[in-house]
Image: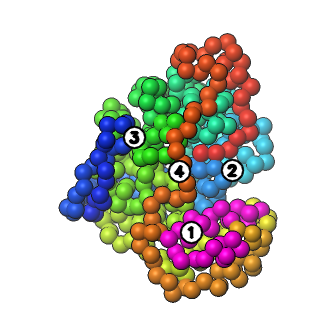
C-alpha cells in the first residue's frame, strides 16, 4: 500500500557553496507525496522510517518505547564482530530483542573480512536477526583510528571484502550499509562505495549527509543524498541527517527523492517523534505536542523499561540520567531538580522527583524541538598512520586490521 503525505515544508537554508549545506527553498505550499512501504530484501517496512543505531541509546528499552508510538525499522546498538563471535556478555545483550520486536535488526561493526563472515554466520545460523546493517558511518575516534566506521570505505578493496563476506554468509537475510559522505571534502567515498555495495547484493543504502570531519557539526548536505539517490536505482536509498521533526523528514524526501529516512539524535528524549513520522507518512497532520506531565510519564516509562532490560535498577538509573536533559529540553524545569534527577539510584527516587513537576505546563513549541545535545565543531579525523596515502592497505595497516577488532559498541 502506498502512503500519501500532506505537509507544509518548513523553511530550509539553501546551499552556500561550502559543501556543508543543501536544502530546498522555503515554501509554505501544501504538498502531496506518495511513498510505498520500504522494501529491504524480503522485508516490508510499512512506515519508511529507520531508527539509527546509537551507542548507549538504542537498547531494547528505548526501541520498545519508540515502537509504542509508531512503526518503522528499529536497529539495535552497533555490536563489534569479534566481541560477538567471542560471545562477550555485553554483545549478546546488545543483539537481544523483545519477543514482539519484528523484524529484528542488528548493526555490525568490523574491520576484518574473516571476522565479519564469522559474526554474520553466527547471527544467521543461531537465528538472532532478520536484518543486518554494516556500519561504515561512525565518526568516533576509538573506531576510526582503527580504520573502522567512516574511515573504512576509503580502503575500497577492504570495504568490498567486508560487504561481500557479509552478503555471502547472510543468505536470505538482507544486508544493508550505513555510511557518511567520506572522510572530508577531499576524500569523498559514498558514491564509489555505494556502487560496489549494490553490485555485491546489498538490499539498501543509508547515507548520513556529513563527512567524518564534520562529525555532527554544521548542516547535513542533502544534495549529496540526492546525488546518491540519482545514482542508485536498484535498491532503496535512505537519507540521514538533521531530521528533527516530521516536517524535516518530508522535506528531505521531497528534496532528495529518497525512499525513506533514518532518524538518530532527533528522537533523543522524544520517542513520540516516531508517532509524528507515522502520522506524516500516512497523510495525517496530527502531531504529538506533549505537556510536561506527559513528558514526565514517558521518562518514567523509559526508566522502567531500562530496569527490565538490565535487571539491575542502579544500572538502569545510571543509564536514564543522560536522557533527562533531552526529555526536558525547552520545558521550564529548574536546574536544581535536573541536577537531582541525574543522581537518582532507584525508580522510587525518580518518581518522587517527577511528582514535584507542574504537570499542567503545556508544550513549549519550538523550544522543545531542534538539535539535541552539543554538536560541537568539525573535528580532525583520527585515522591510522598513512591511511590517506593510498586507497590500498599497506603491510602495516593490514597487520593493524587483524588486531583492531576491539570490543567497541557504538553508532
Where on the picture, by quarter, is residue 10? bottom left
Q: In this rendering, which labeled residue sits more in front, label 2 or label 3?
A: 3
- Check the picture and name the quadrant holding the N terminus: bottom left
Residue under circle 1?
Answer: 327
Work out whether mark 1 precedes mark 2 in sequence or the reverse, and give the earlier one: 2
- Alpha carbons under labels 4 and 1: distance apart: 17 Å
Question: In this view of the protein, can residue 41 be seen by the observer?
Answer: no
Q: Nearer the viewer, residue 376 or 386?
A: 376
Where residue 55 appears, x then y in whole percent? 63, 50
Q: Are marks 4 and 1 in contact (CB under 8 Å)?
A: no
Where residue 42 appears, x then y in whole percent? 46, 44
| Residue located at (64% from left, 58% from top) | 60
Where on the picture, by quarter, is residue 59? bottom right
Work out whether mark 4 precedes mark 3 in sequence or the reverse, and give the earlier one: 3
* 10 Å crowding of disc 3: few (<14), some (14-19), many (20+): many
Q: Secondary structure at mark 3?
A: loop
Q: Secondary structure at mark 2?
A: helix
Work out whether mark 4 precedes mark 1 in sequence or the reverse, and give the earlier one: 1
* Mark sitting on residue 94: 2
Image height of 327 relative to 147, above or below: below
Which stretch did the figure color magenta? 315-340
Residue under circle 4?
Answer: 375
- Alpha carbons under labels 2 and 3: distance apart: 33 Å
* Mark sitting on residue 20: 3
In the image, residue 320 lies in the stretch drawn in magenta? yes
Where residue 41 appears, x then y in whole percent? 45, 41
Q: In this rendering, which labeled residue sits more in front, label 1 or label 3?
A: 3
Task: Give left or right: position of 189 versus 295.
Answer: left
- Alpha carbons under labels 1 and 2: distance apart: 24 Å
Q: In this rendering, which labeled residue sits more in front, label 2 or label 4?
A: 4
- Alpha carbons under labels 2 and 4: distance apart: 26 Å
Amino acid at each position: 500500500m502506498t502512503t500519501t503525505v500532506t505537509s507544509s515544508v518548513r523553511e530550509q537554508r539553501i546551499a552556500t557553496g561550502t559543501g556543508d549545506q543543501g536544502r530546498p527553498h522555503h515554501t509554505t505550499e501544501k504538498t502531496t507525496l506518495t511513498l510505498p512501504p520500504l522494501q529491504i530484501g524480503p522485508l516490508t517496512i510499512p512506515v519508511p522510517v529507520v531508527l539509527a543505531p546509537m551507542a548507549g541509546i538504542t537498547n531494547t528499552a528505548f526501541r520498545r518505547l519508540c515502537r509504542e508510538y509508531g512503526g518503522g525499522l528499529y536497529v539495535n546498538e552497533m555490536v563489534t564482530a569479534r566481541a560477538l563471535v567471542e560471545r562477550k556478555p555485553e554483545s549478546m545483550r546488545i543483539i537481544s530483542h523483545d519477543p514482539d520486536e519484528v523484524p529484528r535488526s542488528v548493526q555490525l561493526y568490523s574491520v576484518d573480512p574473516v571476522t565479519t563472515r564469522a559474526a554474520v554466520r553466527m547471527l544467521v545460523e543461531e537465528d538472532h536477526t532478520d536484518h543486518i546493517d554494516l556500519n561504515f558511518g561512525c565518526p568516533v575516534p576509538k573506531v576510526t583510528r582503527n580504520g573502522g566506521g567512516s574511515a573504512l570505505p576509503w580502503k575500497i578493496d577492504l570495504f568490498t571484502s567486508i560487504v561481500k563476506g557479509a552478503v555471502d554468509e547472510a543468505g536470505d537475510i538482507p544486508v544493508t550499509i550505513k555510511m557518511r559522505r567520506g572522510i572530508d571534502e577531499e576524500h569523498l567515498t559514498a558514491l564509489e562505495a555505494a556502487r560496489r555495495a549494490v553490485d555485491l547484493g546489498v538490499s539498501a543504502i543509508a547515507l548520513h549527509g556529513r563527512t567524518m570531519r564534520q562529525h555532527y557539526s554544521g548542516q547535513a548536505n542533502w544534495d549529496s543524498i540526492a546525488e546518491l539517490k540519482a545514482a542508485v536505482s536498484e535498491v532503496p536509498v535512505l537519507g540521514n541527517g538533521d531530521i528533527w521533526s516530521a516536517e524535516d523528514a518530508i522535506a528531505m524526501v521531497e528534496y532528495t527523492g529518497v525512499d525513506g529516512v533514518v532518524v538518530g539524535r532527533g528522537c533523543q528524549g522524544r520517542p513520540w517523534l516516531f508517532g509524528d513520522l507515522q502520522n506524516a507518512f500516512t497523510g495525517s497532520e496530527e502531531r504529538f505536542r506533549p505537556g510536561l506531565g506527559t513528558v514526565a510519564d514517558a521518562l518514567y516509562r523509559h526508566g522502567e523499561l531500562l530496569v527490565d532490560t538490565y535487571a539491575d535498577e542502579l544500572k538502569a538509573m545510571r543509564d536514564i540520567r543522560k536522557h533527562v536533559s533531552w526529555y526536558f529540553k525547552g520545558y521550564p524545569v529548574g536546574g536544581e531538580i535536573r541536577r537531582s534527577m541525574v543522581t537518582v539510584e532507584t525508580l522510587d527516587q525518580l518518581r518522587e522527583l517527577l511528582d514535584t513537576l507542574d504537570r499542567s505546563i503545556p508544550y513549549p513549541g519550538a523550544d522543545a524541538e531542534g538539535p539535541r545535545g552539543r554538536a560541537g565543531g568539525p573535528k580532525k579525523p583520527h585515522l591510522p598512520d598513512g591511511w590517506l596515502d593510498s586507497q590500498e592497505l599497506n603491510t602495516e595497516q593490514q597487520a593493524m586490521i587483524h588486531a583492531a577488532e576491539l570490543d567497541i559498541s557504538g553508532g
